[in-house]
Image (tube, coloured by chain):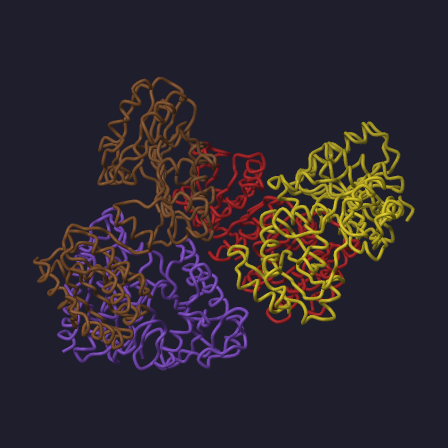
Chain colours: A yellow, B brown, C red, D purple
Amino acid sequence: MKLYEHQAKQVFSKHGIRVPQGKVAHSPAEVAEIAEKLPGDEVVLKSQVLVGGRGKAGGIAIVKKSEAAEKSKDLFGMEIKGLKVEKLLVEEKLDIQKEMYVGMTLDRENKGIVLLASSVGGMDIEEIAAKHPDKIGRKTVNPVWGLWDYQVRELLYDAGIPKEYFRDVFGIVKRLYSIFVRYEAELTEINPLVVTPTGVYAADGRLNIDDNALYRQKEVAEFKEYAGSELEKEAESKGINYVKLEGNIGVIANGAGMSMATMDLIYLEGGKPANFLDIGGGASADLVKASIDLITRDPSVKVIFVNIFGGITRCDVVAEGLVKAFSEIEMQLPVVLRLAGTNEEEGRRIIEEYMEKNPNKLVLVKTMEEGAKKAVELGGG
Amino acid sequence: MKLYEHQAKQVFSKHGIRVPQGKVAHSPAEVAEIAEKLPGDEVVLKSQVLVGGRGKAGGIAIVKKSEAAEKSKDLFGMEIKGLKVEKLLVEEKLDIQKEMYVGMTLDRENKGIVLLASSVGGMDIEEIAAKHPDKIGRKTVNPVWGLWDYQVRELLYDAGIPKEYFRDVFGIVKRLYSIFVRYEAELTEINPLVVTPTGVYAADGRLNIDDNALYRQKEVAEFKEYAGSELEKEAESKGINYVKLEGNIGVIANGAGMSMATMDLIYLEGGKPANFLDIGGGASADLVKASIDLITRDPSVKVIFVNIFGGITRCDVVAEGLVKAFSEIEMQLPVVLRLAGTNEEEGRRIIEEYMEKNPNKLVLVKTMEEGAKKAVELGGG
Amino acid sequence: MAIIADENTKAVVQGITGYQGSFHTERMLKFGTKIVAGVTPGKAGEKVHGVPVFNTVREAVEETKANASVIFVPPAFAADAVFEAIEGGIKVVVCITEGIPVHDELKMYWKAKQNDVILIGPNCPGVMSPGKSHLGIMPADIFKQGNVGIVSRSGTLTYQIAYNISNLGLGQSTVVGIGGDRIIGSDFIDILKMYEKDDQTEIIVLVGEIGGTDEENAAEFIASEISKPVVGYIAGITAPPGKRMGHAGAIIEGGKGTAESKIKALENADVKVGKTPMEVAEIVKSLLK
Amino acid sequence: MAIIADENTKAVVQGITGYQGSFHTERMLKFGTKIVAGVTPGKAGEKVHGVPVFNTVREAVEETKANASVIFVPPAFAADAVFEAIEGGIKVVVCITEGIPVHDELKMYWKAKQNDVILIGPNCPGVMSPGKSHLGIMPADIFKQGNVGIVSRSGTLTYQIAYNISNLGLGQSTVVGIGGDRIIGSDFIDILKMYEKDDQTEIIVLVGEIGGTDEENAAEFIASEISKPVVGYIAGITAPPGKRMGHAGAIIEGGKGTAESKIKALENADVKVGKTPMEVAEIVKSLLK
């Protein structure tokens, strides 16, 4: 779960990392009101969207207070990488003397938490890493032993953090790490971390929380807002892993690997999947039905390919869900179905029984390769 | 640092362990006032002293509310193992159905934290351990990995905690462990842990904090009260390790081992030390002076044996402190002095210089064996 | 011989009284796995499909000499279950549970590592040695005893590929689903090492997917350390970068870990990479001749 | 040969710019210890008694190939210093600092253990191999090169006994002050093992005190594993039970760990126990003849 900048900053501030004064506005009137109370002549308007590259997309503006409301009208309703801007963070404009970077994320390879720091910030950290690898400090922390002071010092010496800001950045890295651990983050970063005449501030902030930990991370779980397209939001609220894509072949599979392999096969056969949809392991009949329901509401879908290989997922349960969906939803779309694995026999029996009585456009296939070919055929790919 | 029962219970309660209702009283009037507000007809008066065995010494009484003030007069001013009772904890009387035990302390041998639990409590845990070893659950926790739920379960199954209290005791052990770690305890225990019709309560509580951690344990460091005799309190406030003993030979040495060896030698020579006093490593001249000052104020002391072997402690600094003490304190007592080790030459020179001008009763000896013999001689042992 | 699980495997099932635990215990028993004990705190004395239940792993091991564990407890309790298994003396821990917080998974990894315990998963289908032992949730019918070793990050894809191999008249020595989470107990390299040493295994199939650099690292290892032929498959060629694909293990991070990069790395290590699950089976068959 | 510290020891001093660090660095240098680097964060580039100062241990080790460290940093920072030394590649860490919180000491112990690092102390006088190397704060003048190995929980008592031994015309192979705290990096048994293997050491002196059961455990170990003669001394025969004797290491806990129990255990292991520091030296002399 990604937190919005303003939410991340709220967490940072609570744990002693200084952030600019500011507040979230939902309308130009609110923008004017908030801007009025901030220090200085100018304010910063920052679109709150959960993608990178806002700045380049024109989602950030520095304006005179008197022009803040007017300018905000341009930003509200803007689309950045497909996401509508509905909230603006209105902040004081800092007197920036220097930009630095600190961040941390999971280190899959070393099974730890990798800390990054740079005395150069404000640009894309990946770009810095590529062009000035010497300017990046890097340190993997063992999660069992936790972060020790000497590691922070090594990190900051490697990053070339100037002596005069060393103590401030040291404190910020320690606080950021305890936020990372306490909130069970996957990633958190401050870019840029800025030096001003009154101290070091987090001018921007990212904090992504592990979804699997939300059940015990109540404080941030409350921030949860479903994001993306309407169908994606609905899917997420129902616990279905769904991503809208460009094509016209609806895909339902179990397991991320199987779902991806199904998409890959459709491409190989010359078709284009309309979505990624993974019902996960051990799906219930209701979840299967909800998945069918979801896909049928995507107008670009011309055919649905249901590709199940049962393990913890049971073919009979999937079959029941399908029958339920076909009975309750007005289905015009042809469905290609492949069932194999756990309780395969029973699953096929349920489907065949249903097909005997109902002349649905349902094609039962033996292999996923055959299924992909059939789906592409029916989809007119 | 040992916390009083009422302080330990305050910490327990703050962290979700249930304790009886109650408050500390410093006078019979306060006792009456507190008793009045407690539920039930009877209350418990508990002497607040930092030694075990209060109960057997008559320091605890269960009385009718109306008689609480009168009875408290007997308790106030009582002496238990040399400690005056100055505070009483006035508590509601619980309806006790069963007594159990949980506790934890440092495990020196296994370098961990050992958790103990028993379904039998209320008596001396050591006695239970000796007579019913099967009734004690024991589990060493590795401090790096911390306490995991399965360890608590194993502990409670081993201790034979009945099923109906299992969940309550489980929660209490987990809370107690987090108190142990969070407050950097050396020992914490609940004895008895009692079952009442309204739940499981800590009827008594101990919590000893590592003195070395007090600088960062501000919450409990505030509880700090100097305990013991007047001289012991003064010594503690000055950072001198001092324990009053029965004999008449004042002892000053550096290092606990050396101090004990000095006492042992005095005994071997037929004398009795008046105290244990360790000036520690790297003592300053002022500390040496304060130590002399302290010992001269113990009326039972007839002679002082200063036994120093310098390492991190410097003989010249000790000598300076002695000279300072002799110059500023009116000294009637003979002093036997042994100086060896770091800066020995300079130390002896300072002392000899001083002795040339001042006819103090100061005997400079070569070895500690010789010093002990001389001290016993001068002390009339 | 097979790897990880074989005739000598005596397993305890943690969470045996739960719905999944009970269901899959029955299936494993039917397959022939020696399930000697179950563990659910507070349920000692009960039986599940004839298997005695204990309160603690320690007790279960003392009573039954179990040497492996299959974990079905809910995600909030899974790390504790893994720790209990390891401290209880279990040497092979297969954690089926999906949805474990990643900070817990980090601790599980290090605990297993420090105690020289083989941890498979979490969020994995388990280990299957056809004809010998099955620790997990795989559909047993599709496997046949043979000499193809399979190691895979994806559950269902594993079944698919094993199924295809069986249908071509071949069989598997062992099939290991290492799990799709970002932090897992055993990675490709750990399993490759075992297959290299295993007499029964003549050829290895590696099934990867986008995300992380585990496949790239495995390719490097194969080039220098593996003498047996390896056939690969990578899912996610058409996955849009940056979009979240089901479980977090499949996020494409920072441009690294693409299917292209993995396929290239494997091919550079002389691994034949199949374009479809069927093609993988066909390559295996051709190489075994 | 000597143990722990010898001619090949190249030491870094952590906290070299502090009062104690600087004072004892000068003394160690005068003795002949190879102090190759100092570490104080933020003071890189300075020199202390001619020794170059670095910001981190890692850098100091990279530049000077130091293999030992002596730590003088204040108690609040000591555990971090020990961790830094260990992760920096140091193999012998001598921690002089007194007053370290015991929960920190627990972590120090396990960190050293896991990395196979010899941690001496904390709250100890260090290690002295006369004529070779001295890592710590011992008064160098009182030692002489020889073949008596001393291991002790008490600082000043160690000096006293070594001094007595030197005065009898004998000398020491190595003198190790293991420290008086309840949780220490190396205990009697760890050091006894090294003396047993050390060619130079012909006889071992063990100096204990009341509290804990380290001496009792050592006695058991001596009985079964040590072939060289051992002479013992235990301080605290007359210490009143339950009273706090200076540092926490000397608390008598629960009736265990009395001087009587320790002396008895040692005598049962054929260790001659001296009643005074002088007598210990005399026994050593008589046994060496």
Residue B34 in sight here: yes
* Left or right of B280, for residue A371: right
Residue C167 in sight here: no
- Which residue is more in the foreground, A309 or D106? D106
C1 versus B102 height, above or below: below
- Which residue is more in the foreground, D75 or C90? D75
* Left or right of A328, for residue B235: left
- Which residue is more in the foreground, A100 or D214? A100
Q: Residue at x 47, y 51 (%)?
A: B145
Where does the image place residue B296, in percent across and percent down from the top left? 20, 56
Where does the image place residue B278, in percent across and percent down from the top left? 26, 59
Where does the image place residue A173, in percent across and percent down from the top left? 61, 58
A121 versus B1 height, above or below: below
C199 versus B47 height, above or below: below
- Which residue is more in the foreground, A323 or D289? D289
Q: Residue at x 61, y 68 (%)?
A: A163
Where does the image place residue B269, in percent across and percent down from the top left? 10, 61
Name of the residue lying farthest toward the right: A380
* Left or right of A197, for residue A376: right
The mark tally for this picture is: 0
